[in-house]
Image: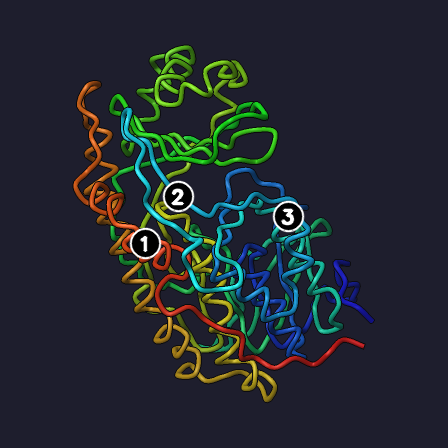
């Protein structure tokens, strides 16, 4: 029998699984797929009724495309609506700079696929449902941990019918940067700091529009993501400045958008009210410890990433692949020890640290000065000018952004579905 999204129907409102994954984002859905593929009885909890959230990362990097290929899913995946980005550039005032050239990568899929995250997650869910050991419970929110002494033995949750308990040998928190389960576990967070926030909105896109670019001018910065018939826009602001921007009025904000990206000027009226603008509070942090007995955090629950480089989705996927590689065989026999669980942190901590360090450099050396520039003072930073002048450096930038540090490959076993 294939996996199901149906809620459990047991007298005591209790469900048992070998592994309970809280959160149906990229980390949770990928881990659920990989563990079910390995024959591990896995239940994934997603608090919403669907995956339709506009303010989620859309950049699927070559490292994730390789994982999809290793899983034999790439052909179906690339049939989903997406746009391919092979070169990454930016506008600094009137100067256009080339920053990364993914086409130079020696790999099968040398591009970034821009795909709405709901399509990505729907695809992972559909792929996981082929395995009888997979269950996805929508509209089911993890609210607390269940413990036996110091050991986590499952999750207290709530769905449309009321309270529900999921008893599990291993509980994995993939419930994001505001993780409820991480807080319930009492794990300490190291705040790295981020000087920016992002305003997220969309406007109509003309068919003959130019490709995706980061745009910096007049002391403002915006990224526009091509979603076919509209632009998904990320307007970068100094941290804590949203209320001041609101106080200036919506017309002033529309003018600011048109100033930094004149291509959007004919359609800024699509920003009809402030309800069309979502504030994304940017954080960079990581846990000092990712585990308790019977409990593990991965993805944003373990390390919140800045939107710089669009790496968050891909770091989450890499965490899931590493976790499945290290734990699938051990889960067959019960709950891995905490030392076994900590191997995931040991494997993924260095890539996390290095990626966050690079994000901090970009924030402090490029984004922050750009936001502080005078209207006539926007000039490409020296680092960007050097990269623009050297194609080899553009290839190295593409490798760092597209593959990251220590890309993971699928090693976990597969028990083919019936």
Going from N to C along the chain, the mark reached first, 2 or 1, is: 2
Question: Disc 2 to disc 1, how far (Cα)?
Answer: 10 Å
Q: Is residue 183 visible?
A: no
The image shows residue 314, relative to residue 243, as above or below, that is: below
Which quadrant of the rendered structure holds the N terminus? bottom right
Task: Say which mark, if any, is on residue 397.
Answer: 1
Question: What crowding class fits label 3: few (fewer than 14 Cα within 10 Å), some (14-19), or many (20 or more)?
Answer: some
Q: Residue at x 41, y 18 (%)?
A: 262
Q: Hey, which quadrant is residue 220 in on the image? A: top left
Q: Residue at x 50, y 39 (%)?
A: 55
* Viewer-side residue, 220 vs 335: 220
The image shows residue 154, relative to residue 114, as above or below, that is: below
Q: Are marks 3 and 1 in contact (CB under 8 Å)?
A: no
Question: Disc 2 to disc 3, how far (Cα)?
Answer: 23 Å
Mark 2 lies on residue: 88
Task: Say which mark, if any, is on residue 107.
Answer: none
Q: Residue 412 placed where, x, y %?
A: 56, 79
**Label 1: element kind:** helix
Question: Disc 3 to disc 1, how far (Cα)?
Answer: 27 Å
* Viewer-side residue, 322 vs 210: 210
Mark 3 lies on residue: 119
């Amino acid at each position: 029998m294939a996996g199901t999204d149906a809620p459990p129907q047991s007298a005591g409102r209790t469900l048992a699984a070998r592994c309970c994954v809280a959160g149906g984002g990229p980390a949770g859905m990928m881990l659920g797929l990989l563990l079910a593929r390995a024959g591990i009885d896995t239940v994934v909890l997603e608090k919403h009724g669907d995956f339709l959230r506009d303010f989620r990362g859309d950049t699927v990097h070559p490292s994730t495309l390789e994982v999809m290929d290793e899983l034999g899913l790439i052909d179906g995946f690339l049939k989903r609506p997406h746009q391919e980005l092979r070169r990454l550039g930016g506008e600094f005032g009137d100067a256009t700079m080339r920053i990364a050239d993914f086409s130079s990568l020696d790999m099968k899929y040398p591009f970034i696929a821009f795909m709405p995250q709901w399509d990505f997650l729907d695809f992972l869910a559909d792929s996981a449902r082929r395995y009888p050991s997979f269950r996805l419970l929508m509209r089911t929110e993890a609210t607390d941990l269940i413990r036996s002494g110091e050991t986590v033995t499952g999750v207290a949750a709530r769905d449309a019918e009321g309270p529900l308990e999921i008893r599990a040998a291993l509980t994995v928190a993939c419930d994001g940067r505001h993780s409820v389960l991480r807080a319930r576990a009492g794990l300490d967070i190291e705040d790295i700091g981020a000087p920016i926030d992002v305003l997220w909105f969309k406007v109509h896109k003309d068919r003959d529009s130019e490709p995706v670019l980061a745009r910096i001018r007049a002391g403002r910065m915006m990224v526009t993501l091509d979603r076919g018939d509209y632009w998904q826009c990320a307007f970068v602001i100094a941290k804590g400045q949203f209320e001041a921007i609101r106080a200036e009025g919506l017309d002033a904000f529309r003018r600011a958008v048109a100033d930094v990206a004149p291509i959007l000027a004919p359609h800024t009226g699509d920003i009809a009210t402030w309800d069309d603008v979502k504030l994304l509070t940017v954080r960079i942090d990581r846990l000092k410890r990712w585990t308790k007995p019977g409990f593990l955090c991965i993805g944003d629950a373990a390390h919140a990433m800045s939107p710089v480089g669009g790496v968050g989705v891909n770091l989450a996927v890499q965490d899931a692949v590493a976790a499945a590689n290290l734990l699938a065989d051990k889960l067959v026999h019960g709950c891995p020890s905490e030392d076994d669980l900590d191997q995931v942190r040991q494997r993924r901590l260095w890539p996390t640290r290095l990626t966050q360090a690079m994000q901090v450099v970009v924030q402090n050396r490029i984004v922050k000065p750009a936001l502080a520039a005078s209207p006539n003072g926007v000039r490409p930073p020296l680092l960007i000018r050097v990269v623009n002048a050297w194609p080899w450096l553009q290839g190295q930038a593409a490798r760092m952004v597209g593959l990251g540090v220590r890309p993971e490959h699928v090693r976990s076993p597969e028990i083919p579905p019936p």
